Amino acid sequence: MDRTMYERPEKRARLTLLDENVPRVDVCDGGHQVAVNSGQHEQLGIGRGLPPAGIGYSPEFYNGYARVASPAWRDDDKDGHYMFELGENITPRYKIISKMGEGTFGRVLECWDRENQEYVAIKVIRNVQKYRDAAMIEIDVLRTLAKNDKMGIRRCLQLKTWFDYRNHVCIVCERLGPSLYDFLRKNNYRPFSADLVRDFGRQLLESVAYMHELTLIHTDLKPENILLVSSEYVKVPDYKTSNTGKHVKRVPKSSEIKLIDFGSATFDNHYHCSVVSTRHYRAPEVILGLGWTYPCDIWSVGCILVELCSGDALFQTHENLEHLAMMERVLGPIPVHMIRRADRRLEKYFRHGRELNWPEGAVSRESIRAVRRLPGLRNLIMHHVDHSGGLLIDLLQGLLKFEPSERLTAKDALKHPFFKESNRRL
């Protein structure tokens, strides 16, 4: 599959470190210093005593730490983003170490928590009312997840606290490693091994099952929103690209992951907007305007597992008709009963209310070629899995059913034999 054919959609900020050369500052508070630019968080502290004279601290203290004075008030930028400099404070408690990401909602900053002596990620929301309102909904979701998972074993991002700072809602969470998408990107889109796909899939489904138990639907599952807990990795020979072993690829030292970004999560009994999910992971019922509930998350999980296994997004498109044609190419025809119930505004996508208007309705010849290049699901998986991929294919066929009511639930998917093969390679 040619990754250059289509641009991936603009991504929302991720609670993860960016590339290794992103500017960061050292932590130095009250005689306690941590070297952060080396990649090794080496403690160089000499206790919580007073800092040396002339270091620029105000005479005020915060929980025993002399604090740097808060920066002078600045106007936000034209889009309502908080303006900052590295090394400044967000309240006396948090020192800004680096910028981790940016999106439509605001910015994510890596900070040093002076009170708990740890690194955290702070999501600083734009000073725009609709984003402030959305942030309060996300806080409510994070509180619900934390209330029912006090030990943090359900693999969902842990909310530490939140506060309002200079008209910006600030959500403080644990700092994690890179997203699975970032890891793929830095690996030149070399896929993960089947064993890692199994580990990631099991943990992801456990998180989704937990959310569904709480009547929550994530609605934006994608590799960008799945973070490795640790940033550590090893480099190993990549024999698939070179028989001499000169080419190497990164392999995470730990397969532990956590699910993030609950800004679009919705309680099942609350209002459902008509369109959810990032395009590549959007379920057919959403495109067809048939309404959606828990199974839309399951479809996204299926798309994610294929991407982790192959290195490429399964449906790389930006247009509805082409997207549906790609689905049919990979999975077979869309059920007629779903077509007949589709939103009337989509009639141009179908012939006689029975079949997809393809390739006649295609916007370009390149679009037709893009669909034709896609293999069927079985061939796609077998191309990337060394040994018997039958169990993985069977699982994916259950996750990627067109009819939402026929898809596996997260709990049922966890019982699939694919996840009982932990001691065998596929």
Image: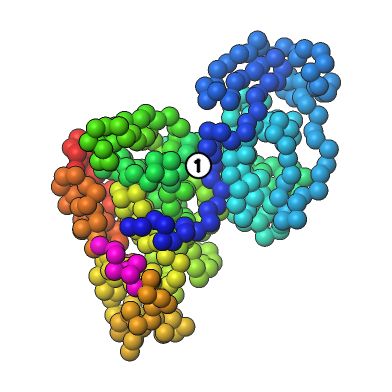
**Three-letter amino acid code at disc 1?**
Leu
Give the residue drawn at x 64%, y 18%.
33
| Left or right of residue 274, residue 360 in this image | left
Residue 309 percent across, percent down from the top left:
30, 48
Percent from the top left, x then y, of residue 69? 81, 29
Eyeballing the image, is 225 above or below 300?
above
Q: Residue at x 17, y 52 (%)?
A: 390
Please indicate whether residue 313 sits to the left or right of residue 417 in the image: right
The answer to which of 67 and 150 lies nearer the viewer is 67
**Quadrant of residue 114 within the rendered picture:** top right
Quadrant of the image occupied by residue 397: bottom left
Magenta portion: prevailing SS class = helix
For the C terminus, which image quadrant? Answer: top left
State the image coordinates of residue 170 (x, y, percent, origin top left). 66, 44
User: Picture quarter containing residue 198?
Assistant: top left
Quarter occupied by the N terminus: bottom left
- Is 63 colored magenta in this rendering? no
Q: Which residue is mark 1?
A: 157
Q: Which residues are magenta?
A: 368-375
185 vs 399, nearest the viewer:
185
Q: Where is residue 123 drawn, in percent x and y?
A: 62, 44
